[in-house]
Amino acid sequence: MKEELWDIGKMEMKDPWGNMLHVYDMERTICDIVKNQKKIELQVYLQAIKNYFQRKDKNLRKLARYAKKMGIQDKVKDIVYMHMEP
């Protein structure tokens, strides 16, 4: 991965023992899953996408912004359209 993409969606959170961890937010994780779809088991891929779109705290604008930076804007747009409620 390009070095300029390393910090996109990076955040800190505490683990159950109080240690600070560097993790990626949901939108970055979804972008990574979409970008690496061929390397991920289909069941895992589909469940991750389904779970994301069922969440009330998803941020589609952030997802679109990350997708554009990562060069997967068209793929993510197709996925969003498929999961939009009529």
Image (cartoon, rainbow, N blue to C red):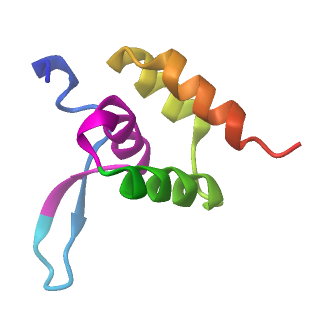
Q: Quadrant of residue 60?
A: top right
| Residue 23 place in picture, x, y as percent | 22, 53
| Residue 20 place in picture, x, y as percent | 13, 66
- The secondary structure that dominates the magenta segment is helix
Q: Is residue 50 left or right of residue 48?
A: right
**Residue located at (51% from left, 50% from top):** 49
Q: Quadrant of residue 34?
A: top left
Rendered position, 13 above or below 9? below
Rendered position, 7 above or below 30? above
Is the N terminus in the top left, top right, bottom left or bottom right quadrant?
Answer: top left
**Residue located at (36% from left, 16% from top):** 69
Which residues, given as a range, are shown in magenta?
21-40
Q: Is residue 47 left or right of residue 70?
A: right
Is the C terminus in the top left, top right, bottom left or bottom right quadrant?
Answer: top right
Q: Nearer the viewer, residue 44 or 74?
A: 44
**Residue located at (52% from left, 28% from top):** 76
Which residue extends farthest right? Answer: 86
Number of labelled discs?
0
**Residue located at (64% from left, 34% from top):** 80
Rendered position, 2 above or below 43? above
Q: Is residue 66 left or right of residue 55?
A: left
Q: Quadrant of residue 70?
A: top left
Q: Is residue 11 magenta?
A: no
| Residue 75 place in picture, x, y as percent | 50, 23
| Residue 61 place in picture, x, y as percent | 59, 31
Q: Is residue 10 left or right of residue 43?
A: left
